[in-house]
């Protein structure tokens, strides 16, 4: 299994590649994070980030199965693995009906995609892939056919239930949003700016309903109750304690997405502060 460590950084900004992304990954490697995760991912982009570093793992979070042919992905992953052995984790997901062309039964489509990866000329090993899993069926599939699960926009209580479903062995690596502010109004405003788009995507709202939220929690970018559940904020001690709750609930790895209200730039100062409060070095 790919060693992703206890903490990683999740950033959609890294998908843009180029010099700034390379510098960012080099620094995250030095800061002691175990992995970087990047959204709307591709295998070649992951290869570029791996080439920029010497130790850190790179995980796609998440590669949409509707966007990339399985045989091509397996071939690309094999080439990256040859250059950077044991450092690529292919996170796969079914995306969302409003966003994906030709969207169909997601569970069956994922089973077919995994079958195609297994039968490719360069099969992608089970240990090198994970699923964006929220529902029980997809979590069980993640445990059976991949290294484990990478759930997004969840809380520690969800993680505890997911660990029960997965069992003791598989990787459980939730994404967790963090605002490094103890000001409730500022933290919720920044969190809500990011969470808002997800309140209109059924995969997430259905999961939040299973988590005990109500339809009213999805209005106006998310209620304070929802934001406080899926976005960690507070002073350093509070943030450290809340992130520890995820590990205590059964997470092997926490992929932290630092939110600072400026999505057009890499939150590098926030990453440095996070590395310090987590004492990664």
Image: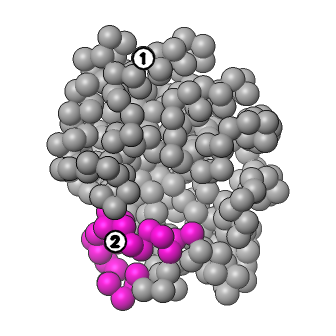
Q: According to the image, label 1 marks what residue?
A: 75
Q: Secondary structure at mark 2?
A: helix
Seen at 43% across and 63% down, the residue is 154
Dot 1 or dot 2: first in sequence order is 1
Residue 27 shown left or right of residue 163 in the figure: right
The residue shown at (47%, 20%) is 76
> Which quadrant holds residue 113?
top left
Magenta span contains residue 247: no
The C terminus: image quadrant:
top right
Whole-percent x, y for residue 239 in the image: 66, 67
Front-most of residues 111 and 237: 111
Q: On residue 205, which mark appears?
A: 2
Question: Where does the image place residue 120, in percent across and percent down from the top left?
Answer: 30, 16
Q: At numbered mark 1, what does the secondary structure look like: helix, strand or loop?
A: helix
Q: Main secondary structure of the magenta part?
A: helix
Q: Is residue 216 rendered magenta in the image? A: yes
Q: Which residues are magenta?
A: 194-218
Residue at (23, 54) in percent of width and height? 136
Q: In the rendered image of this protein, does residue 279 appear above or below residue 213? A: above
Where residue 236 appears, as percent x and y from the top left, is: 74, 68
Query: Nearest the camera: 160 or 225?
Result: 225
Q: Quadrant of residue 122?
A: top left
């Amino acid at each position: 299994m790919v060693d992703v460590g206890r903490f990683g950084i999740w950033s959609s900004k890294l998908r843009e590649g180029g010099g700034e992304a390379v510098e960012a990954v080099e620094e995250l490697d030095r800061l002691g994070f175990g992995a970087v995760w990047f959204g709307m991912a591709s295998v070649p982009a992951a290869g570029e980030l791996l080439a920029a570093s010497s130790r850190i793992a790179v995980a796609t979070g998440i590669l949409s199965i509707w966007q990339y042919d399985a045989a091509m992905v397996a071939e690309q992953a094999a080439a990256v693995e040859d250059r950077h052995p044991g450092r690529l984790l292919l996170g796969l997901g079914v995306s969302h009906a409003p966003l994906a062309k030709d969207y169909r039964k997601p569970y069956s489509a994922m089973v077919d995609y995994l079958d195609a990866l297994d039968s490719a000329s360069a099969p992608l090993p089970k240990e090198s892939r994970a699923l964006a899993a929220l529902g029980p069926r997809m979590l069980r599939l993640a445990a059976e056919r991949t290294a484990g699960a990478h759930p997004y926009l969840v809380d520690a209580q969800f993680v505890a239930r997911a660990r029960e479903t997965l069992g003791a062995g598989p990787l459980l690596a939730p994404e967790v949003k963090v605002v490094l502010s103890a000001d409730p109004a500022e933290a919720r405003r920044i969190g809500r700016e990011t969470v808002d788009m997800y309140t209109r995507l059924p995969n997430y709202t259905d999961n939040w309903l299973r988590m005990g939220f109500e339809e009213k929690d999805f209005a106006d970018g998310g209620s304070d109750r929802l934001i406080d559940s899926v976005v960690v904020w507070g002073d350093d001690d509070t943030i450290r304690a809340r992130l520890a709750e995820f590990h205590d609930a059964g997470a092997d790895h926490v992929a932290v997405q630092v939110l600072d209200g400026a999505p057009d730039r890499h939150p590098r100062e926030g990453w440095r502060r996070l590395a310090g409060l987590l004492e990664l070095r």
